[in-house]
Amino acid sequence: MIRVGVIGAQGRMGTEVCRAVEAAEDMELVARLDEGYDYAQLTGMQVAVDFTTPTAVMGNVKAALDMGVHVVVGTTGFDDAKLGQVREWLSGHPGLGALVAPNFGIAAVLMMRFAATAAPYFDSVEIVELHHPNKVDAPSGTARRTAEMIAAARAGRPSPDATTDALDGARGSDVHGVRVHAVRLAGLVAHQEVLLGGHGETLTLRHDSLSRESFMPGVLLGVRWVTEHPGLTVGLEGPLGLE
Ligand code: NAP
């Protein structure tokens, strides 16, 4: 049995993770932790799963690693600096693993992979991400990661754009040279479109998370993966065997 603790257990994602861990035959939910918890409560667990906030997550990750606990992180807002910091902490704990995944949805990970595969064959590519209005970070971690993968696949080749006169934000944000547009709308969960345009044809890749349950198979896969893969793993591609 893998002993799992959930940090951010009362949150929207944390609640689902607790339910999924309790239903998994090879896992035991040993702690539900929320804001104000004592780091000593991390004792005795093998894996801590963090779905908190971009400001809280780093303290939680450091505390878990210091307590000898592997971490699975779903909290978004990770940039190269934060990943570098986690890598540095891990170097002091050679047996421990950390998995940081901006999206645990298996279909979403495939959508990112398909977008990166298609991107070199088109002149233009832009991303539209759409989420519920309670989301605090924009653009989403998934959109940032998609843009990064697309930019790498196109070796940084920019999309044509003659815009010289625009209102602030009209062309979205520039993420690794890829335009990303963020929509916040009541009623939505998590959605993304990658728009690709070439000579007289377009291709649209769309992914929809219709409920937070969609992330749970990926989270459980991550929990199993991290206990056997020391060091930093970014994204679910490795655990899914896509690398
Ligand atoms: P949420 O409902 O606001 O839940 C966050 C929870 O974390 C709350 O219960 C909050 O407690 C708690 N928290 C805040 N600071 C804490 C701390 N220092 N220590 C422990 N717990 C703390 O948010 P959510 O919708 O579940 O999303 C959580 C994160 O997951 C966000 O970053 C979101 O973007 C990300 N996310 C990732 C994926 C993925 O697949 N990777 C999917 C969906 C969402 P209080 O309310 O008491 O402050």
Image (tube, rainbow, N blue to C red):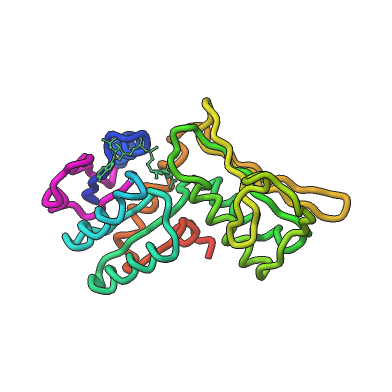
The range drawn in magenta is 25-50
Residue shown at 46%/58% (left/top)? 235
Is residue 118 left or right of 68 when viewed as pictured?
right
- Residue 123 position, x and y percent, is 78, 59
Residue shown at 18%/42% (left/top)? 36
Per the image, is 26 magenta?
Answer: yes
Instruction: Between residue 55 and residue 162, name the one nearer to us.
Output: 162
Instruction: Between residue 7 and residue 31, name the one nearer to us.
Output: 7
Q: Would you identify the image quadrant in which residue 13 lies?
A: top left
- Residue 224 position, x and y percent, is 34, 54
Q: Residue furthest right?
A: 200
- Residue 181 position, x and y percent, is 62, 45
- Residue 200 position, x and y percent, is 88, 50
Residue shown at 36%/49% (left/top)? 54
Residue shown at 33%/52% (left/top)? 223
Is residue 214 left or right of 175 when viewed as pictured?
left
